[in-house]
Image: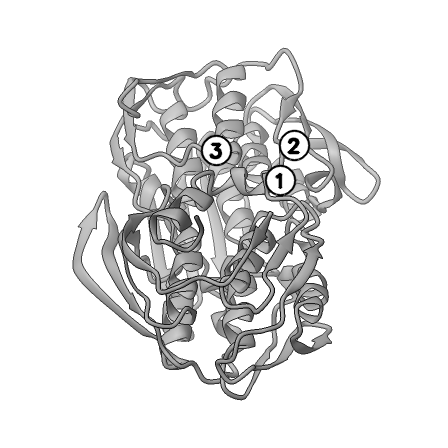
Amino acid sequence: MTFTAASALSGSVAVPGDKSISHRSLMLSALAVGESRVEGLLEGEDVLATAAALRAMGADIQRDDDGIWHIHGVGVGGLLQPQEALDMGNSGTSTRLLMGLVASHGITATFVGDASLSKRPMARVTEPLSRVGASFTASPGDRLPLTMTGACPAVPLDYTLPVASAQVKSAILLAGLNTPGITRVVEPIPTRDHSERMLRGFGADLEVEVQADGTRIITLKGEAELKPQNIVVPGDPSSAAFPMVAALLVPGSQVTIANVGLNATRAGLIDLLREMGGSIEIINAREVGGEPVGDLVVTASALNGVEPDPARAPSMIDEYPVAFVAAAFAHGRSIFRGLDELRVKESDRIATMATGLRAIGVTVEELEDGLIIEGSGGQPLPGGGPIATRLDHRIAMSFAVAGLVSHDGVTIDDMRPVATSFPTFTTLLQTLGAIA
């Protein structure tokens, strides 16, 4: 698909439900006793893979015609032996978090995925989960296909995260739900805290202590009894990033993005774009289901180069590809460092973005842990392509945004992976007037 220069974007849109919260709402509802209701669930392929896996392990999950999801859980400790392999598609979050659930149940499960997911290493999860007693038989390089057998009873874990990873943290906490005793996770660098918020909301005995240096110590009392909940999922800030950057870059644009989750552990891109000179106003700030939410009013702005603190990476790790696009149109140079985590996402996002940016006319230097990008000073880029997205949804959407501010358009080799997180992406751009 080719995305070409757009006239001013305008209108009010809503993005799909937050992917992180959607995954967790299904998983914890499946472990509660009784019926939970979830409104606004992201119905992308990744979250549907989580739903299918939980059904395979005994949870009753149904969707009404009005879009409300109803989950009848099996209770903590009640997951059943799946009869077939669990197909995770492209979803690393589904895979790693569900491994945490299985780790403290006496069942065996085989995880399989698509070509992209099967290249992603799982050692960062299998190593700590092995310590609770789970056993693994993985493909070379600790990759999928992977078969694991949980331990029941599992051994409570006291674990310091060696890298900032909300997925690893969450997998350990989920394993701790059915583990006798206290599970303790030490997080030197804070990551998104949706798991902690939602575990508390479902009734888990969980405490968070924040030390003077910012280290978070999370303790969870095992053998929990979770109570069913009614959950409203806010709009995904990672999805809002694409219309937000598009509105900043396309001259004359003003766009309102409604109902966006504004959890401080996820809001790094908003802060970064404001530092670059972007006009982003938050209105109607409120709290929904324990999560801060607001509407974003974004107005086209001249952006300046930036050199963000690497410590902010966890708060916007999924938004860096589109941040690179914003930097490509800024005045001056931007230097991004401390982004090693991007090497092991759906693609090597540092290398993939560097190659694609060069292909559309950007001067860029690839670093071991980031990129140096010379901005165009607000001028449209030549464009080009087709861009090799490596089956990565965020790469595809980032270059689609770049195409809206190009002379000759930007061609994307494959837009199908976008369905994993943002199935309404092109429809939203049409609503704003970006594409016909």
Q: Which residue is mark 1?
A: 129
> Which mark is nearer the camera, 2 or 3?
3
Above/below status of 29 relative to 11: above
- Taking the spot 68% from the left edge, 48% from the top edge, the residue there is 413
- Taking the spot 54% from the left edge, 59% from the top edge, the residue there is 398
Above/below status of 366 relative to 49: below
Q: Which residue is mark 3?
A: 47
Q: Are marks 2 and 1 in contact (CB under 8 Å)?
A: yes
Q: Percent x, y for residue 53?
A: 54, 23
Above/below status of 122 relative to 260: above
Q: Which residue is mark 2?
A: 134
Name the residue type under label 3. Answer: Val
The kind of secondary structure element at disc 1 is helix
**Badge 3: how crowded within 10 Å, few (<14), some, or many (20+)?**
many
Q: Quadrant of residue 211?
A: bottom left
The kind of secondary structure element at disc 3 is helix
Q: Percent x, y for residue 319?
A: 50, 61
| Pick the front one: 412 or 265 | 412
**Residue 64 showing in the rendered view:** yes
Q: Percent x, y for residue 52?
A: 52, 21
Residue reaching furthest to the right: 140
